[in-house]
Image: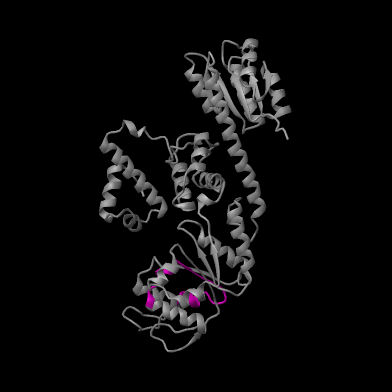
Amino acid sequence: MNVPARKLLVVEDDEGLQRQLRWSHADYDVLIAGSRDSALVAMRAHQPAVVTLDLGLPPDPDGVSEGFATLDEILRIQPATKVIVASGHGARESARRAIAAGAFDFYHKPVDIDELGLIVSRAYHVADLEAENRRLADAALVAQGDVLGGIITGAPEMLKVARMIERVATAQVSVMLLGASGTGKELLARGLHNASLRAAKPFIAINCAAIPENLLESELFGYERGAFTGAVKTQEGKIELAEGGTLFLDEVGDIPLPLQVKLLRFLQERVIERIGGRKAIPVDVRIVCATHQNLETMIAAGRFREDLFYRLAEIVVRIPTLAQRHGDAALLAHHFLGRFSRENGRNFKGFTPDAIAAISDWGWPGNVRELENRMKRAVIMSESSRLTAADLDLGGDSDESTLSLKAARDAADKIAIRRVLARTDNNMSSSAKLLGISRPTLYDLMRQYGLEA
């Protein structure tokens, strides 16, 4: 089966160049237009993804006014069009102006056919990426319902997780969410609660890693007045507060062994005793927990109880990383751009092609949290109308081969610190631990490199 050739619109009034460009782009279905009017007719009739445009069109062949008017009209008709403008020698200012107006790229006259061919090929590649992202966005809108409305995805891997969450939501089972940091475990837990028969009751979340061991028991089980120094009144714990609803235990792998025993007893008997109390208090609550740790390894090492694991993991849901969610990085980037632009009173036209390519190619070690963090900083700090890869700190740095050894080391340190800060959501203690340095050293390095948390 023959695949139709891609349509390429060439807007050029020189008949000799028309023939040359048609011949040099034999792999495409080349449409020729010699004026603004004929170019706009071709745009409406054929909707080509890529256009080459000579800025010197009649009736202003020696100027650029007609070319810029044509550029504006093309982008008004089809904003996603990749327009490649031609500029003569010494016309750098016109090229820069065209890029600012929304052109994809430019090429010099006289034409270097090989160079132009590469630019056209890259334009189609970016157009394909953006078209795929739009398709995924449409799929995401279909996939999102009232239940899991907070999940932005078009990736089959994540849609499978969402469907699984919906299926187990109404079952009376404990659910364990396994996934790397920043993959959206709490968002999924809330979605599960909202889809359950307990949706009208409380959703109580507690991060077991964020609370010191000596305070975690009182946070979970509460305490009676006078149970210890400072206990001036009776305090209900998170388990009681979740009565009738859902208790989400995030980073459950960080619960110390003595407290694991008490949690297991609650799961078996469904009653608790506050610290310093003797009264058994029945509690009806569903447990949903999450961790990024390998609990099987912890069980083998004696750091997590196997019987507790099986009580908590009646259903296990494994959450893919952002890198495993095909197309979701760009989809989420557009979502965050709109959200943070509204929050900060900014107005962006979108992303430059290099930004889209960088977002799609980046490994995202910090997952959705890293992407959200980078987008927030970029929206606040960028001075351009479109976010670039450099705005997102995903490219645009100097060629490291020209750097001195010290400068190269400094550049590597900056990249490492930025990535870890993004991964930990600017938690200085966690960042220092991951980097293998002390907190004061981290602060010193951030001051040295001009980095902000």
Q: In the displayed structure, would residue 264 be above or below residue 76? A: below
Q: Which residue occupies the foreground of this view, 294 or 186? A: 294
In the drawing, does residue 25 fall left or right of residue 110? Answer: right
Q: In the displayed structure, would residue 16 be above or below residue 242? A: above
Q: In the displayed structure, would residue 437 be above or below residue 83? A: below
Total labels drawn: 0
Q: Residue at x 56, y 27 (%)?
A: 103
The answer to whether residue 26 shows anywhere in this view is yes
The answer to whether residue 207 shows anywhere in this view is no
Quadrant into which the N terminus falls: top right
Q: Which residue occupies the foreground of this view, 116 or 249? A: 116
Indicate the position of residue 183 as horizontal and vertical percent values: 50, 56
Residue 247 in magenta?
yes
Indicate the position of residue 216 as horizontal and vertical percent values: 39, 73
Indicate the position of residue 108 as horizontal and vertical percent values: 51, 17
Q: Quadrant of residue 192?
A: bottom right
Which residue is situated farthest in the front direction here? 1
Q: Residue at x 68, y 18 (%)?
A: 33
Q: How is the image coloured?
A: one colour
Give the residues in magenta. 237-257
Q: Which residue occupies the foreground of this view, 451 or 85? A: 85
Q: In the displayed structure, would residue 236 be above or below residue 379? A: below
In the drawing, does residue 145 fall left or right of residue 260? Answer: right
Residue 74 in magenta?
no
Indicate the position of residue 401 as horizontal and vertical percent values: 33, 32
